[in-house]
């Protein structure tokens, strides 16, 4: 495939938006309602990243399928109401997106957050940036780190995978980027550390959103 327009796929939670507190508060509320042990907000940094089912598994550590399903149902309802309470883009994200918009790059989101919530967040916080492809977790599509979602975005935008930058904050994102044959940019303002990102294939590590510009403009 011929070289296409510069393209950047972003992860959502921990990369574009700081959603940890809303996720933790909602899950802890559900756990409390059911008389189950709650967790510290920081613990959720390790519970999030592989989708809502895994979040529930991590928050419960055991328990019957019936309880898991009940927690999942209540969490989704609670989170739907609190979606925008404390969640906001990380410092520097709007400045980065302003620059990328001026450069007319293709922008996309690929998240393991349920698809509806992902679309709602992008519409609410980033509607002016013209994200061309926005995908959350859909039941019929294998979630990250499976590369299918990332590859489908490259195909939809008519860009060779090896030219696409994939930006994320966890091993799940680095693995996704590498198995889709994309360039992996690991960010340090999200939920995990540099060691994890390096160990799972980060080609670049950035400390501030604007550092991404230097990498993608080359
Ligand atoms: O909600 C999750 O588990 C992960 O979401 P993310 O892929 O946007 O980090």
Image (spheres, rainbow, N blue to C red):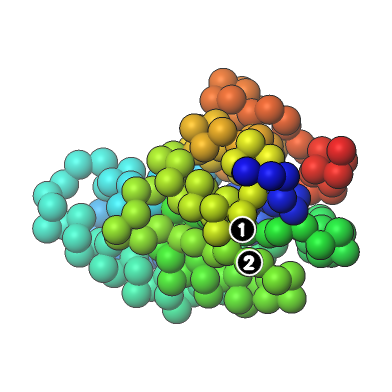
Q: Is residue 218 above or below residue 77?
A: above
Q: Quick one: quadrant of the C terminus? A: top right
Which labelled disc corresponds to residue 157? 1
Q: Quick one: quadrant of the N terminus? A: top right
Kindly tell me whether residue 41 is visible in this rendering.
no
130 lies left or right of 177: right
Q: Quadrant of residue 2?
A: top right
How busy is the neighbourhood of tag 2: few (under 14 within 10 Å), some, or many (20 plus)?
Answer: few
Q: Which residue carries the number 2 mark? A: 132
N-terminal label among 2 and 1: 2
At mark 1, the secondary structure is: loop
104 lies left or right of 10: right
**What residue lies at 52% left-to-right and 71% top-to-bottom?**
119
**What residue lies at 26% left-to-right and 41% top-to-bottom?**
61
* x and y, in percent, of residue 184 in the image: 64, 35
* x and y, in percent, of residue 118 in the image: 50, 66
Q: Could you tell me how far apart the alpha carbons at marks 2 and 1 are, in whole angstroms?
A: 8 Å
Which labelled disc corresponds to residue 128? none
* x and y, in percent, of residue 15 in the image: 64, 50
């Amino acid at each position: 495939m011929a070289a296409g327009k510069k393209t950047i796929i972003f992860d959502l939670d921990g990369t574009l938006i700081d959603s940890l507190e809303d996720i933790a508060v909602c899950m802890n509320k559900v756990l409390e309602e059911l008389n189950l042990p709650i967790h510290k907000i920081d613990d959720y940094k390790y519970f999030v990243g592989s989708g809502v089912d895994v979040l529930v598994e991590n928050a419960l550590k055991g328990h019957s399928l019936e309880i898991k399903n009940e927690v999942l149902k209540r969490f989704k309802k609670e989170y739907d109401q609190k979606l925008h309470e404390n969640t906001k883009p990380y410092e520097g994200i709007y400045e980065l997106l302003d620059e990328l918009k001026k450069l007319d790059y293709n922008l996309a989101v690929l998240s393991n957050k349920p698809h509806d919530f992902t679309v709602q967040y992008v519409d609410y916080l980033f509607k002016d940036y013209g994200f061309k492809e926005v995908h959350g977790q859909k039941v019929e599509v294998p979630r990250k780190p499976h590369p299918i979602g990332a590859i489908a975005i490259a195909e939809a935008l008519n860009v060779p995978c090896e030219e696409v930058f994939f930006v994320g904050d966890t091993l799940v994102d680095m693995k996704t980027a590498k198995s889709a044959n994309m360039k992996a940019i690991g960010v340090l303002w999200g939920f995990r550390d540099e060691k994890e990102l390096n160990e799972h294939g980060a080609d670049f590590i950035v400390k501030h959103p604007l550092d991404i510009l230097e990498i993608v403009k080359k």
